[in-house]
Amino acid sequence: MQNGKLRVIIENVQPQVDNGLYPAKRTVGERVDISASIFGDGHDHIRASVYYKHGKDGVLNETAMCLAYNDEWTASFQAKEKGTYYFSIHAWVDHFETWYDGFKKKASAKVDVKTELMEGAEMLRKLSLINPKLVSVAAVLEDKTHYAVALEKVLSPEFENIVHENPLKEIYTSTEKEFEVLVENRKANFSAWYEFFPRSASLTGKHGTFQDCIRLLPRIAAMGFDVIYFPPIHPIGKINRKGKNNNVRSEKSEPGSPWAIGSDEGGHKTVLPALGALEDFKKLIAEAKKLNMDVAMDIAFQCAPDHPYVKEHPQWFKQRPDGSIQYAENPPKKYQDIFPFNFETDDWKALWEELLSVFIFWMDQGISIFRVDNPHTKPIPFWQWVITEVHKVNPDIIFLSEAFTRPKIMASLAKVGFTQGYTYFTWRVSKNEIIDYVKELVHGPSRNYFRPNFWPNTPDILPFHLQHQGENSFIIRYALASTLSSNFGVYGPAYEFYENTPIAEGKEEYYNSEKYEVRHYDWKKTNRMTDIMTMINQARKENEALQSTWNTHFCDVGNDQLVAYLKATDDLSNIILVVVNLDPHHSKSGYVQLPKDRLKLGDKINVKLHDCMTDEHYTWTQEWNYVDINPNKMPFHLFKLQLHESHL
């Protein structure tokens, strides 16, 4: 039987994931906002506190919760260190505060409160066991010969502070468990990815090498990217090798798809000889780090028919009745050049251990970021296990989930450990679609476990809204991706040079896809797109407000083709307002409403704006302000706001 004296109920504690089954996620420097529904019977005053600590044996800290509205209570603390924070909530009926509230009402009504003074003194005596200074205050209330003095004492501002600072915790309700908040390194929440194929990195028209990639690093670093992502760099299968535009038959000179991994040259722990040696790859990683960039490695757990695993461990693959091995299919698509692993094999333990060793091998070479291909086609319990094991070796390893799949599967992958995930942003185009989706990510339950990474394109996806479009469409989507989400990426050269031709109408695939051939780019060329990429990335680095996804606040604007959103730090020391024209062909105008409450603006508005893209300056002196965006000049505004001193 539970303690019948408990009168306070605690419900709907946040942040939590599946009732504490998984930790909520934050990064170093983020504020952890805690909330709960807390209530009890009657009209007695309730108080509550959050107790939190860093690590199981950390120092326990207490912070008071505040009543927000409708029995919702809130508190917060700063996540200053990496690792796991633990928190619980205690709530109680505070008879001291209840007494004080009643005392003031009675005194105001000129009711005799001599008995109430004695009650207050009793409570002060209890509290003096913790705060001995309260003994003297209790004595004042107990002095029956100086009623007026005692009355004045209780009604003083000093006594109000005493009540506030000395909660009377006699019987309290606490959450049944401690909830976990996993705090990861800052890059988990702020990164800019640039993807390109190493075999297309040559400046001379030959098959590219790691040395060619090294020569490109300064160019990409100067554009402001901090993650270089390569498709698989392993030997490519020779059996059933795909040809140009996914042709089932390849010519002798065609290189095949990098995702068809493994041949007589090696498997997942080997690099393609045409790219160079393992030492060349390690040098590439080191040179990238000198430029404050990380190399992200693609992990695709699948094999070409001539991968060494197929011969050495045939039990890891699904055998068909005719003795052949089942190749990958996503009907009507067929992938004759790929054998998927059979995770239902009786030898699953050995398979799991071997796949873990692939991660460990590349970590030993200097890799700290993995982009995992199609994780939704492998068992989720495997990912939970392998990510846990990897993090035992290095808790800072970042995993990006490339899972464009059903929402619940994407959510589950994030819960079990993936640091970031690809999203549906790629297909959110209209104003309402963009706003609804971002609000879902920022304010929905997935906020506690799913970190979005926005990609306007990938080697697999040329979205319909970029097909046969010019540079303005590409600029608009880049601006949205890089300012709405603090993590974003782009399949770089195809995007820089506006590749917009699909393999066929109705298909979201590139014609002459780089997945099946070596491409040659003019890497010395720059254009409007590369300039804008550089400017936006620079603005992201210089403005803390753009380094979070979670502070996005959409502003009303009177035009369906204009979307406006504010991003600000908690203390309003850095404020960014982005206004995007979603029409790549025509000028659009409208009035943007400044969120006065969020910006703490009074009736007299005086806001200075600097457009970081055009270097133009404006002053807004009213709540609604006119904007007119010509996409041929710049399809968006990226304003940095300076509030008048009286607003801060």
Image (spheres, grey):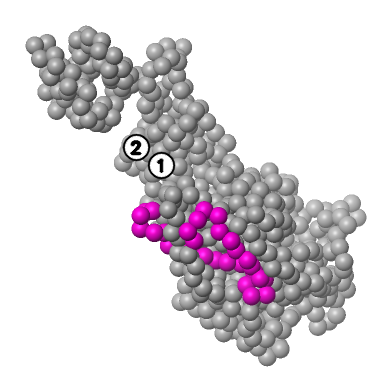
Q: Is residue 634 magenta?
A: yes
Disc number at residue 66?
none
Q: Which residues are magenta?
A: 620-648
Closer to us: 112 or 326: 112
- Residue 534 x %, y %: 55, 75
Extreme residue in the left direction: 145
Amino acid type at mark 2:
Thr
Horizontal relation, residue 199 to residue 396: left or right: right
Labels 2 and 1: the sequence-earlier one: 2
Above or below residue 305? Residue 594 is above
Query: Dots 2 and 1: beta carbons under 8 Å?
Result: yes
> Viewer-proximal residue, 368 or 462?
462
Q: Mark 2: few, some, or many residues within 10 Å (few <14, many ≥20)?
A: some
Residue visible at 51% across and 74% down in the picture: 615
Task: Between residue 532 and residue 52, name the one nearer to us.
Answer: 532
Query: Could you tell me which secondary element the residue under label 2 belongs to?
Result: strand
Q: Quadrant of residue 112?
A: top left
Q: Is residue 602 left or right of residue 497?
A: left
* Residue 304 % position (x, y): 76, 66
The label shown at residue 76 is 1
Q: Report the side of 50 relative to 120 (left or right).
A: right
Disc 2 from disc 1: Cα separation: 8 Å
Is any part of residue 31 visible from this angle?
yes
- Label 1 crowd (10 A; few <14 / some 14-19 / many >=20): some
Query: Element under label 1?
Result: strand
In front of the other: 317 or 410: 410
Quick check: 142 above or below 209?
A: above
Residue at screen point 45% across, 19% down: 40
Q: Which residue is mark 2?
A: 63
Q: Amino acid at mark 1?
A: Ser
- Residue 169 position by quadrant: top left
**Residue 241 in the image, given as x and y percentages of width and height:** 82, 72
